Amino acid sequence: MSKLGTEMDPASPASQMGDPGQGPDGDVALVTGAAHGIGKAVAQALAQAGFLVVVSDIDAPAGEAVVRDLNAGGSRHQFAAADMRNLLDISGLVSSVFERCGRLDVLVNNAATTRAIDFLELTEADWDSTLDLNAKGYFFAMQEAARRMESGGRIVNMASIAGKGWRETSNIAYASSKGAVITMTRIAAAALGPLGIRVNAVCPGMTKTDMMLDWLARRASAAGVTPEQILEDLSGQVPLGLLNEPSDVAAAVVFLATDASRTITGQSINVDGGTLND
C-alpha cells in the first residue's frame, strides 16, 4: 500500500476521493478501520444519519466495497486507504479529508488489532504492534484532527470493556491499549474542550464480529468444546443475556457524533448488556 504523506501523491487512494456529498448541515465523518466489523457498522449508521462518510482502512478492496454499498442509493461517500500505525499515513489521511471535503466534523478512531494470546506467551513484538495501532495511532489521529477541526468537532474513540479490566480479554496488550484509549479520551476532552471539541469513548462488550467468532473458535478448540457452548457460557455472564450486534455499538457512536450529546465529553460509555458496572 502506498504511504500517504502530508503532500498527497496524485496516485494515492486518498487523493482519488471524488467530490464530497453533503450530510446534515454538510457534516463530514471520518471512520478508521471501517472495512469490517464494528467500523463498517459505524460507517453505515453515520451514513444513514445523513453524514458524508470517509471510510478508511488498510484493506483497500474491502473498504472500497463498503463505499460502493453506501453509495448504492446515489450518495457520494468516499474511501481513503491508510495504515494508522504510520504517522505519515495519519497526517495524509486527515489532510486529504480537508482537501476533498473542506471540513472534518467527526473522527471515529476505530482501527485496532487483537488476537488471543496467553499471558505467558505474549512477546515484545505482540506488545509493540498492538500499542502502535490501538493507542499511538489513536493519539496522533486525534492530534491531527484537532489541529484542523472547528468548534463543534467531535471525536469518538473505540475502546473496550477490556480497558476497564474485563477478565475475558483476548490478551493483556489489547486490554492495556484500550485502557490507554479511555485515559487519553479523558485528557483529550479536558485539553480540547476550550476549543469546542468533544471527545468520548465507546466501550463495547462482546460483539458478534468475525474477529470475535474467530476468537470463540480458537477458545473452543483449546477447551475441547463447541463454539456454541462457549458462546452460551459467555452470554450467561451478561445480565441482559444479549451479546452486541455491531449495530448496537454503532448506535452509541452516532449518539456521540450528534448534538443529542452536546454536553457530554470525556466519557467512556459501556455497550455491554450490563457486563461491567462502571
Image (cartoon, rainbow, N blue to C red):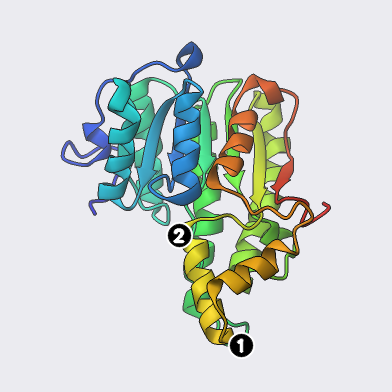
Q: Residue at x 50, y 64 (%)?
A: 213
Task: Report the front residue among 111 and 141.
Answer: 111
Judge from the rendering whether residue 190 lies leftward or rightward of residue 26; answer left or right.
right
Task: Report the front residue among 18 and 183.
Answer: 18
Q: Position of residue 188 (x, y in %)?
A: 67, 41
Quarter of the view holding residue 118: bottom right
In the displayed image of the protein, which residue is found farthest to the left? 11
Q: Are marks 2 and 1 in contact (CB under 8 Å)?
A: no
Q: Position of residue 57 (x, y in %)?
A: 36, 48
N-term-proximal mark, 2 vs 1:
1
Examine the rendered structure and indicate whether residue 88 appears above or below residue 238: above
Examine the rendered structure and indicate whether residue 81 appears above or below residue 68: below
In the displayed image of the protein, which residue is found farthest to the right? 277
Give the number of the mark in front: 2 or 1. 2
Examine the rendered structure and indicate whether residue 172 appears above or below residue 159: below
Q: Is residue 116 visible?
A: no
Task: Report the front residue among 202 and 212.
Answer: 212
Q: Position of residue 56 (x, y in %)?
A: 37, 42
Looking at numbered disc 2 in the image, what kind of residue is underneath it?
Asp
Name the residue tied to disc 1. 120
Quarter of the view holding residue 195: top right
In the displayed image of the protein, which residue is found farthest to the top? 25
Q: Position of residue 98 (x, y in %)?
A: 38, 26
Judge from the rendering whether residue 238 lies leftward or rightward of residue 58; answer left or right.
right
Examine the rendered structure and indicate whether residue 152 appears above or below residue 227: above
| Tag of residue 210 | 2
